[in-house]
Image (cartoon, rainbow, N blue to C red):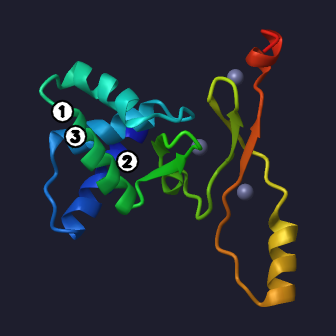
Amino acid sequence: MEQKKTEELLKERLREKGLKVTRQRILVLSVLEQNAGRHMTAEDVYDLVSEDYPEIGLATVYRTLQLLWDMQLVDRISLDDGCVRYEIGHLFKGDAKHNHHHLICRICNKVIPFGGDLLDELEQQIEDETGFHVLDHELKFYGVCRECLKKGR
Ligand SMILES: [Zn+2]
Ligand SMILES: [Zn+2]
Ligand SMILES: [Zn+2]
């Protein structure tokens, strides 16, 4: 059901841009949707897409992710290691803003989503003090995840 909605939105956006609806575009987006909550590298996406579509190349996956990002259908974060991670776009959840913040483990590089957001007040304060209207914000917290802590570093 959800799947259908995503696919429809993708088709709509592609047509608006005069771009073709292709199987690889649909597959890349649906892999991200099926793995919502995960933050995947292009290689992770490639591994899963190629199970259904072995002919696809990694370069195509890169280009497709870039295109989907341009169309605001996927979100991405870049880590200090230069590795970009992708996830299904927050627009699909009907939210104008991002839907979570990111906790990044310094040891294993895992990215953990965190839903709480206490920044409305700060945004209001920024607006009051500077007249700057905040549309969105992005936060990354760096630390050590529970599993790495248990392993005793
Ligand atoms: Zn860790
Ligand atoms: Zn995320
Ligand atoms: Zn936030």
Q: Is residue 35 above or below residue 11?
A: above
> Residue 59 location in percent, x, y?
22, 40
Please give the residue where the numbered disc 3 appears in the rendered image: 59
Tell me which residue sits at (26%, 39%) in the image. Answer: 61
Please give the residue where the numbered disc 1 appears in the rendered image: 57
Q: At label 2, which amino acid type do we have?
A: Lys
Mark 3 Cα within 10 Å, few/some/many (few <14, many 20+)? few
- The answer to which of marks 2 and 3 sits earlier in the sequence is 2
Mark 2 Cα within 10 Å, few/some/many (few <14, many 20+)? few
Q: Are marks 3 and 1 in contact (CB under 8 Å)?
A: yes
- Quarter of the rendering occupied by the N terminus: top left
- The answer to which of marks 1 and 2 sits earlier in the sequence is 2
Residue 72: image quadrant is bottom left
- Quadrant containing ligand 1: top right
> Residue 92 location in percent, x, y?
48, 52
Q: Is residue 149 above or below residue 88?
A: above
Closer to us: 36 or 106:
106
Left or right, 126 with reference to 135: right
Could you give the CA–CA distance between mark 3 and mark 1, rounded to whole angstroms?
A: 5 Å
Mark 2 or mark 3: which is in front? 3
Tell me which residue sits at (25%, 49%) in the image. Answer: 63
Q: At label 1, which amino acid type do we have?
A: Gly
Mark 1 Cα within 10 Å, few/some/many (few <14, many 20+)? few
Q: Secondary structure at mark 3?
A: helix
Q: Are marks 2 and 3 in contact (CB under 8 Å)?
A: no
Tag on residue 5? 2
Could you give the CA–CA distance between mark 1 and mark 2, rounded to whole angstroms?
A: 26 Å
